[in-house]
Amino acid sequence: MFSNKRLAKAPEQKYNYAMALTRHCWKCGREYTLAGTPGRSEACICGADLKVCLNCVSYEPRAAYQCRDRRAEPVFDKQMANYCEYFEMARREFVAKTENNSRETKARDALKKLFGE
């Protein structure tokens, strides 16, 4: 009744992009594996709070108050836990921050050269 062609194994994908997107700590990149969103008192093993603007899907550095959600009240400490009702933890790839390539580091180096330090 069933042919072997229908039961043939699907070709394997070279990259699985869905697996690369994880919910993780904004500071160290450790994956958050529990279901649901973290509470205000939850912290990562590195000591960073998890319910912070930097972990939210609505966080956008170029938007007003760095938040795309217009209903949310402004939060000024983006790395500190807050009481935002609209928080939803973002799924994304972790990219470690490199301090050597930052704009701030380049500006400081230029000033040091200028003043001869």
Image (spheres, rainbow, N blue to C red):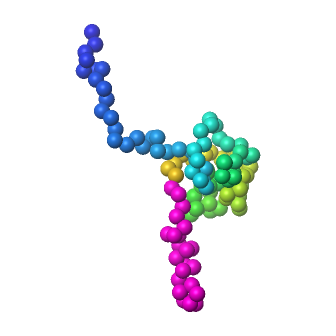
x 66%, y 48%: residue? 44
Furthest residue to the top?
1
**Left-right relation of 52 to 7:** right
Q: What is the x, y in percent for residue 93?
A: 50, 50
Choose top left, top right, bottom left or bottom right for residue 32.
Answer: top right
Count the marks: how many? Answer: 0
- 35, 73: nearer the viewer: 35
x 62%, y 60%: residue? 66
Q: What is the x, y in percent for residue 35?
A: 62, 35
Q: Which residues are magenta?
A: 95-117
Res. 78 visible in picture:
yes
x 71%, y 56%: residue? 80
- 66, 5: nearer the viewer: 5
**Left-right relation of 101 to 38:** left
- For residue 107: magenta? yes
Q: What is the x, y in percent for residue 112?
A: 57, 85
- For residue 37: magenta? no
